């Protein structure tokens, strides 16, 4: 009897435990994980989610691309907002990708053929005592499973194009722009913080284009907004910088609001915050606007102020009669397809331009540096003044500014509201030849018609007079 009671008690305990075990398994299956261990992996379609559910790590395709990348993005924004890309220069070309550890402890992305690229180098601890974790800050780390504070690698030390709160930026730890909206491969621009090239004792933000200086901020002087003074004019200053001479980080304001600083593919730095109601990003500050950068498009190149940063076209173009010096890089300027002949050259009208600053103004009041001004000049006289000088390459004329001439190569050309008359060889007037014919041919044809009509009328009149004379003689 006692044996039966004991057996029934054991059965009761087992029956009661079954729902608990099932509940634990169901909870484990539905709760997103934020780590993968040495013997685990995630495939395309699976993901890791940070403990606060703010960030997601998984496979994605940017824009119109079908290539697959491992990335980190915000979980709560529409369509996600990618802030870091692991294999930016080594995409997976289908959905066969897997994120896992290799035999020596490196975190890798492997495709269906077995080829792989290393995301993070793992060394300095036992191979099996490691895991990859996505933190609430958006930082992907490789750490010890036994001691989470033992971090051997983190993505904040290898940023892509986005600076997140808590991330340190230096001249080594750089932001690197995407190549295009559809391609996160390393682009042409870098952004960092460090000693100024001119004054080593002062540090500043520095944007480089192909290793050439593109833009620099104001210098750091200990004030949280000394680097970007214009932020002080905002009703709410969105970020506060904490820097020394070599490193810089920031905190968002208000605290806790989703904030990011992005180096876009056109080389501009953007500070944006999420609108809590719409869940959309609001652009708070952007600099430099591309055409503000001195001589961005090189000599004789024209910068398009209205070009969208996500457009596939180049922001730079060449005027008629010119061609890009480097077809693969439109920012290296433009060169004439036909040299000027001095005698017989023509001018084309470049409408809606901002005229370059290195001009010569013709004036009755004499010279001032390289500028002269002759406000009484007519447009035809201004054109003649440029044409008679073989080194003159362009002119502009207005009632307010008089006559302005340019000599040699033109720099800082960009869209605007003025008209620049550009000198080119007569043989380059392709479309203008047809325009000339369209203007000249009708009046010439009309004159020919009048001449023929006049001759015909005279002949008719002479013939009539001759007939009258014959009638007189015969009568």
Image (cartoon, grey):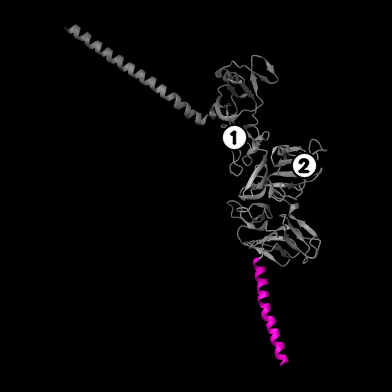
Q: Say whether disc 1 or disc 2 marks the residue closer to the N-terminus.
A: 2
Please determine whether, in this image, residue 238 is positioned above or below residue 438: below
Residue 297 visible: no
Q: Nearer the viewer, residue 280 or 326?
A: 280
Tell me the CA gap for discs 1 and 2. Answer: 42 Å
Left or right: 147 in relation to 237:
right
Q: Secondary structure at mark 1?
A: loop
Give the labeled residue for mark 2: 224
Tell me the quarter of the picture where residue 56 sits.
Answer: bottom right
Instruction: Residue at the far bottom: name it.
Output: 1
Q: What x and y, as percent, mark residue 390?
A: 62, 22
Q: Nearer the viewer, residue 318 or 280?
A: 280
Q: What x and y, as percent, mark residue 371?
A: 67, 20
Q: Which residues are magenta?
A: 1-30
Task: Give yes or no for contact between labels 1 and 2 (Cβ–Cβ under 8 Å).
Answer: no
Considering the whole magenta stretch, tell me its main secondary structure. Answer: helix
Q: Nearer the viewer, residue 374 or 143?
A: 143
Q: What x and y, as percent, mark residue 364?
A: 64, 14
Left or right: 65 in relation to 187:
left
Q: What x and y, as percent, mark residue 260?
A: 69, 48
How many neighbours does mark 1 have within 10 angstroms: few (below 14), some (14-19), or many (20 or more)? Answer: many
Give the labeled residue for mark 1: 318
Q: How many marks?
A: 2
How many neighbours does mark 2 have within 10 angstroms: few (below 14), some (14-19), or many (20 or more)? Answer: some
């Amino acid at each position: 009897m006692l044996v039966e009671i004991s057996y029934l008690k054991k059965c009761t305990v087992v029956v009661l435990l079954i729902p608990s075990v099932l509940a634990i398994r169901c909870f484990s299956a539905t709760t997103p994980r934020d780590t993968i261990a040495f013997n685990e992996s995630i495939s395309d379609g699976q993901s890791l989610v940070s403990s606060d559910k703010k960030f997601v790590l998984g496979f994605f395709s940017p824009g119109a691309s079908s290539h697959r990348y491992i990335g980190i993005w915000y979980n709560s924004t529409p369509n996600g907002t990618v802030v870091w890309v692991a294999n930016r220069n080594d995409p997976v070309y289908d959905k066969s990708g897997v994120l896992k550890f290799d035999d020596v402890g490196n975190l890798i992305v492997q495709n269906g053929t077995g080829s792989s690229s290393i995301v993070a180098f793992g060394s300095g601890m036992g191979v099996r005592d490691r895991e990859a974790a996505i933190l609430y800050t958006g930082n992907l780390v490789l750490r010890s499973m036994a001691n989470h504070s033992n971090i051997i690698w983190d993505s904040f030390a290898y940023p892509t194009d986005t600076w997140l709160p808590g991330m340190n930026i230096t001249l080594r730890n750089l932001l690197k722009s995407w190549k295009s909206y559809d391609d996160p491969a390393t682009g042409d621009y870098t952004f960092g913080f460090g000693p100024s090239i001119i004054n080593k004792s002062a540090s500043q933000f520095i944007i480089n284009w192909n290793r050439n200086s593109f833009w620099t901020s104001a210098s750091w002087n200990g004030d949280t907004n000394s680097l970007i003074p214009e932020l002080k004019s905002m009703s709410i200053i969105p970020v506060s910088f904490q820097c020394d001479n070599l490193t810089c980080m920031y905190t968002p304001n208000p605290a806790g609001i989703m904030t990011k600083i992005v180096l876009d593919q056109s080389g501009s730095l953007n500070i944006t915050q999420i609108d809590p109601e719409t869940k959309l990003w609001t652009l708070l500050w952007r600099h430099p606007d591309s055409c503000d950068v001195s001589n961005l498009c090189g000599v004789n190149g024209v910068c398009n102020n209205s070009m969208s940063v996500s457009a596939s076209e180049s922001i730079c173009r060449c005027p008629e009669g010119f061609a890009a010096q480097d077809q693969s890089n439109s920012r290296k300027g433009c060169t004439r397809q036909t040299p000027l002949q001095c005698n017989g050259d023509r001018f084309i009208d470049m409408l809606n331009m901002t005229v370059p600053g290195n001009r010569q103004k013709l004036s009755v009041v004499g010279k001032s540096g390289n500028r002269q001004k002759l406000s009484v000049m007519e447009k035809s006289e201004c054109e003649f003044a440029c044409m008679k000088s073989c080194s003159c390459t362009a002119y502009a004329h207005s009632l307010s500014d008089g006559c302005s001439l340019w000599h040699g190569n033109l720099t800082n050309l960009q869209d605007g509201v003025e008209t620049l008359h550009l000198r080119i060889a007569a043989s380059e007037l392709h479309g203008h030849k047809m325009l000339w014919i369209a203007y000249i041919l009708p009046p010439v044809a009309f004159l020919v018609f009048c001449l023929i009509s006049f001759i015909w009328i005279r002949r008719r009149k002479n013939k009539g007079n001759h007939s009258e004379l014959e009638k007189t003689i015969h009568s």
